[in-house]
Amino acid sequence: MKREDNSLNAWNIWSIKDKELLNLIICRAGGETTIRIMDIILKEPKNKHQLSKMLHLDYNTIAHHINIIKNHDYITEERFEKSIYIYPSQKLFKSLEEYKLVKEYLKMKKHNKDE
């Protein structure tokens, strides 16, 4: 979903129906980390240790974000042998188009801030 007008005023981000997703990403200081975690999980299930290494973040930071995302039901956890793997939930898959739009908005917002 590409936007021709790159101004933030052209975005009607608040028209997104999944306000919980919007608040999880846009209205929290840790929204960018949440996006990074969710992007990885959408490609392939990972455990917290793998995410910590991939994102170069402390394990406790990853665990904190995972708990927040899980509390909003956008991810699920399943044990396989000795590890607990994190998977995208059906709720996330149902909101995938809006998730992409929120990501794009946040990217543009950051880009405009850097200018």
Image (cartoon, rainbow, N blue to C red):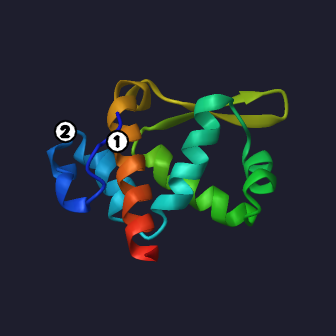
Q: Residues within 10 Å of mark 1 (few under 14, many from 20)?
A: some
- In this view, the residue in front, 110 or 74, is 110
Q: Which residue is mark 2?
A: 17
Q: Residue at x 51, y 37 (%)?
A: 75
Q: Where does residue 59 sit, x and y in percent of width and height?
A: 74, 61
Q: Position of residue 27 (x, y in %)?
A: 32, 64
Decide: is 32 above or below 71.
Answer: below
Secondary element type, mark 1: helix
Secondary structure category for the residue under label 2:
loop
Q: Specify which label sits upstream in the sequence, 1 or 2.
A: 2
Numbered mark located on residue 69 in the image: none
Q: Position of residue 112 (x, y in %)?
A: 38, 69
Q: Are marks 1 and 2 in contact (CB under 8 Å)?
A: no
29 or 80, nearer to the observer:
29
- Which residue is at 40% across, 74% downward? 113
Kind of residue sitting beneath label 2: Lys
How far separated are the C-alphas under marks 1 and 2? 12 Å
**In the image, 46: left or right of 86?**
right
Visible residue check, residue 94: yes
**Image position of 45 (left or right of 103):** right
Can residue 77 be seen at all in this image of the molecule? no
Q: For the residues carrying marks 1 and 2, which lies nearer the camera in this image?
A: 1
In the rendered image, the residue lying farthest to the right is 82
102 to the left or right of 57? left
Q: Which residue is denoted by mark 1 in the rendering?
A: 101
* Residue 8 sits in quarter: bottom left
Q: Which quadrant of the structure image shows residue 65? A: bottom right
